[in-house]
Amino acid sequence: MAAAVPGFAQANRAVPKESLPPVLTPWEITPTVNDNAPFPGHKVIGNVYYVGTADYASFLITSAQGHILINPDFEDSVDLIKASVEKLGFQFRDIKILLISHAHGDHCAGLAKAKEMTGAQVMVMDADVPAIEHPPTGRGAYPSVPVSRILHDKDEVTLCGNKLTAYLTPGHTKGNTSWAFQTTEAGKTYNVVVIGSIGVNSASSLVNNAAYPNMVEDYQKSFKVLKALPCDIYLASHGKMYGLNDKYPKLAKGGVNPFIDPTGYKAHIQLLERAFYYKLDWAMRQ
Ligand SMILES: [Zn+2]
C-alpha cells in the first residue's frame, strides 16, 4: 500500500530529501458553503435513499420492518432529514437503528435528538463510544447519548433482510466506521460502501500526537481495508466526497444509475491516500 507512494515506503522511515508535491482534494481547493442547507431526498439505488443536507450525508436503508439511518448529522439537520424521509414516503418514527460514520459533530451531534424522536437503537464502533457517551465540551460539543450496542470490527447490523458490516477504518477518529452491504435493483445485486472519512483534518495531528499515537498506522490500515472491499456504489459522510453534486442531477436523465461508480471508489481512496502521505511528509518536516 505505502509502496505506491514514491519516496514514502514507511511512515517511520527517514524523511526523504525531496518533499512530496502537494496533493489536495477538490473540496480543499474549493470548499463548499452552506453545507447544512436542505437538499432533495432521493433514491440512490435499491432500498438506499439519500436523506442528508447539502453536504452532510445521511442514508436511509429501508425495510418492511423499519429502517436504518446512517448519520443524523448536526442537531439542526435532524428536522431536514425527517422531512426528506417523509417526502420519500417513509415514516421517520419507523427508524429502528441509528448508525454513524464517526464521532464528529457533523455526523453524530443529531444522535440524541433522532433517538428521542424515534426510540431507535444507537450502535457505535467500540473506539468511538467514549466520544458519543462523553462528548467534548466547548468547541465541537454535542449532546451525549447512551450507546445501545457497542460494535466491533466486522460486526453485522441486521434488520429484515438488510445486513450491514461495520468495518473499522480508523485514523480520522479511532472508531471511524465504513459500512458495507448489498442492495438489489431490477434483479441485480450491488455492493454498497459508505466510506467513513479517510481525510486528514489536521496534518500536524499525524506526528507526536499523545492522544492518538498510532494514528498513522491506523490510516494505513484503513486504506488497505477499503481497497479490499468489493464496491459498485460508494457513498461517504460528505456529499462532496462521492460527487453528490455531479451525480444527483444525472439521476433525472435516466439511463445508467450515476451512483454506480466502482472506478470513482478506487480513485477516491487513491486520492485520499496520496493526500495522507503528502500531509504526513509535510508534518514530519515541521
Ligand atoms: Zn470528521
Image (cartoon, rainbow, N blue to C red):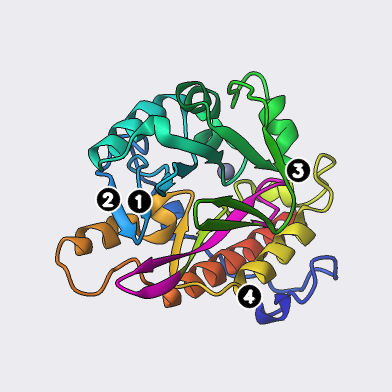
Q: Which residue is mark 1?
A: 49
Q: Are marks 3 and 4 in contact (CB under 8 Å)?
A: no
The answer to whether residue 19 is seen in the rendering is: no
Mark 3 vs ligand 1: CB below 8 Å: no
Looking at the picture, does residue 240 appear above or below residue 130?
below
Q: Residues within 10 Å of mark 2 (few under 14, many from 20)?
A: some
Q: Look at discs 2 and 4 and give the one toward the viewer.
A: 2
Of marks 1 and 2, which one's residue comes earlier in the chain?
A: 2
Residue 94 left/right relative to 11: left
Of marks 3 and 2, which one's residue comes earlier in the chain?
A: 2
Q: Which quadrant does ligand 1 occupy? A: top right
Q: Which residue is mark 2?
A: 42
Dot label at residue 238 = none
Amino acid type, residue under disc 3 in the picture:
Ala
Q: Are marks 1 and 2 in contact (CB under 8 Å)?
A: yes
Dot label at residue 228 = 4
Of marks 3 and 4, which one's residue comes earlier in the chain?
A: 3
Q: Are marks 4 and 1 in contact (CB under 8 Å)?
A: no
Of marks 3 and 1, which one's residue comes earlier in the chain?
A: 1
Q: Look at discs 3 and 2 and give the one toward the viewer.
A: 2
- Helix, strand, or loop for circle 1? strand
Of marks 4 and 1, which one's residue comes earlier in the chain?
A: 1
Q: Residues within 10 Å of mark 3 (few under 14, many from 20)?
A: many
Q: Which residue is mark 3?
A: 127
Amino acid type, residue under disc 1 in the picture:
Tyr
Amino acid type, residue under disc 2 in the picture:
His
Q: Residue at coordinates 44% horizontally, 41% vertically from top-left?
A: 66
Q: CA distance from mark 2 to mark 4?
A: 28 Å
In the image, the segment drawn in magenta is 167-190
